[in-house]
Amino acid sequence: MKEYLLGNAAIARGILEAGAGVVTSYPGTPASEIVESLAPVSKEYDLHIEWSVNEKVALEVAIGASWTGVRSAAVMKHVGLNVAADPFMTLAYTGVKGGLVVISSDDPFCHSSQNEQDSRRYAQFACIPCLDPADPQEAKDMTVYAFELSEELELPVLLRPTTRVSHARADVNVGKGKIKKSPTSHAFVKNPARWVALPAHARQRHSVLLDKQNAIKTVLKNAPWNRHLLVLKGDTGVIASGISGLYAEEAIEQLESDVSTLRIGTFPPPDDLCAEFIKHVSKVLIIEELEPVLEEYVERAARVHNPELEILGKNTGHIPRDGELDSRIARNAIADMLGLTVTMEEPQSLTEADEILPPRPPALCPGCSHRAAYYAMKQVFGTDAIFPSDIGCYTLAVDMGTIDTCLCMGASINLASGIRFGGEDRDICCSIGDSTFLHNGMPGLLNAVYNNAKITVTILDNSTTAMTGHQPHPGTGITATGDKTKSVSIEAIAKALGADFVETVDPYDLNATLETFRKAKECQEGLSVVIAKQACITNARRAGVRRKPFRVNDNCIGCGECVDFGCPAIEFHEDRARINALCTGCGVCAQICPSEAIEEVVNVK
Amino acid sequence: MRTSECCDIVVAGVGGQGVILLSKIIGKAAVKEGSPVRAAETHGMAQRGGSVITHIRLGCKFGPLVPVRGADILLGLEPAEALRYAHYVSKGGIALVNTNPVLPSTVTTGRAKYPPLDEILAPLRRICRDVKALDATKLAANAGNPQAMNVVMLGALSKYMPLREEIVIESLRESVPAKFLAVNMRAFEVGKGEVEL
């Protein structure tokens, strides 16, 4: 039977078919929908799923589960693997018991990310196998295979989908694999030589890991994800990894040329298959997104099997090392290799599109409390202050002048400390979201307190992980399955970490927020924390919260102060402000207006 | 309706207009037809009121991205967004465009200007075979709910896709809440009626 599935839903289906018992994750685009797809059925299949506090925690919980013998998966976006890198590297030494699959979703072109690192490098670094799916079907099938591979090798396996697999949709055959229930009873078997990575054990385990490298190659030798089509008369070839294989096949069909192709889905690549191919051709183009992982492999293999082989790819400029590929890039590179003049139509430049179209950047929602908090922050601290920020919806406020840095999850507080210790005298007020604070901001606040950083930390608390699709976190009192749990107090955490001044304020109350920021700024003795707390407006509206909208009355003098606030519900029309139907009734603009020209609509249905 | 098995569609619009729902209805219909289908969606950061694009490839077994200048149909749920992604439509392709603008914040705050409709449609007409422009938002409002604009556009699109109309409607039925089914069915019919082949 075929279903129309998102790549991430297909991966979730694969996790179920493999009979996994524990799946952990921290939300991150493009990986978030994997756990979300599992949530509605997790209880039915005795599957523990969780939104972990961060990716390191997620992987460690998954490792614990694996060591009891249960199949487990840790799911994250590519930069999440940096956070989880510490357990990831040593996990390769200890190995696993129940199959453990680390899913790290890469994001070529940085659609929703701060970088476009290639997770295949991590698998190389850790000396473990990596699977690179081309489409949702392969992603599902590889997920099941990855658990089996992991158990066979007693090693973690990295599954590396990219945005165009994770967020692709396709007809996926779900008929073959039956969903298995996870066995319910498991026990941890003590084995210090395996599970205690003391130096004496670690040395041995490193040696075991290195010995396994040949076993990895033997197992992957016949993996169905690597396959070639040798064209007898053509002495040119293409070797492509993951989704690039599909781009290459489409390009070759369009060009109607004799090109041998080898599609690779596993790392390390299969030696024998590659050797056969390399001997068959005199010129080869390597097509892969991001890093030249496959290209470097072919360069090494060619030294043994065909030293004369001409290798085209990133080293020759045929394939870019940044951004994402498509069939057009593949077609042009293959045509160039074949010496063909590309007869297909190149994009006709539409100068009008660049000239006349207004930009439409993503923006904070109408009524978003982050906008109000930043407005007050800027009023109090002024444009001269330094505003380190962090990763979340609030980074969309970059035009407000209160986002001076964005590096990685939780960096804002530490950058603020470092900027202070670097000798910056001006006021420093950093901002971090609630989920990001709980993810990796807490150690930063503790560090700032401990080392006497004189800064103000603003926690923008909208009580959800909004940017990635409103996942709950420990401050919300709700688990990944929607069940009630303890709700932790961010204010109590900030106090316990030792901040000198901690105050929570509702950013919809502009005067109170200004007053709180003033007190925080004047907190001479040290570190102040402002918690700007108001529910995410999108979440609130989904929960049925409706506030009366606002409108502009005849007092408006067209000063534009409300328009500069930047809310999409406020328009400037014929020299006057106007509030459109997007208004959610937060009322902040009415507090900003110097002419009392914005008022609540009283008689609203 | 196209006779060829393969049909590449690019849907362009604004976050919140129902671009993804529309794409899912089409994709599910293709699966019902037993036809291979590939699609690429915009999720995450760009959805927050930004410009959104979905690729749908009917009868396709390759990657999900429609090549530049390769789309048989450009479905613009918003005129400026139709032009923004106009480089996808092929020379022999067509563009179906909702003429009702959604003003970006750069315009409402006076930092940029929204171009007149004819300035948007002229370059579109130059680069592809035909442009069908309709005020789908108004037609949806007449049908009972302006939010059903995406389904008006689906109705118009149904005349060009290599999918049977009854299958598309079946997919539509399964994809919208029961209480909005009647208005969506009216919207579909209205959109279909706007297109004469």
Image (cartoon, coloured by chain):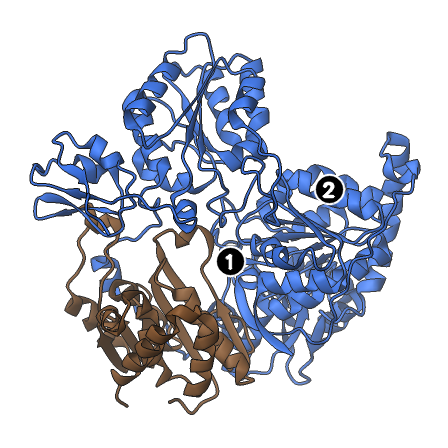
Chain colours: A blue, B brown
How many neighbours does mark 2 have within 10 angstroms: few (below 14), some (14-19), or many (20 or more)? many
- Picture disc at residue A320: 1
Query: What subunit carries mark 1?
Result: A
Distance from the alpha carbon under mark 1 to that under mark 2: 37 Å
Residue B87, given in percent of the width and then of the height, sits at 33, 69
Nearer to the camera, A574 or B188: B188
Q: Is residue A344 left or right of residue A108?
A: left
Q: Amino acid at mark 2?
A: Val
Nearer the observer: mark 1 or 2; the answer is 2
Residue A591, given in percent of the width and then of the height, sits at 22, 31
For numbered disc 1, what is the local secondary structure? loop
Q: Does residue A267 sit above or below A479 in this rendering? A: below
Q: Does residue A104 sit above or below A403 in this rendering? A: below
Is disc 2 on the same chain as disc 1?
yes
Nearer to the camera, A373 or A322: A373
- Please name the residue that numbered disc 2 is placed on: A61
For numbered disc 2, what is the local secondary structure? helix
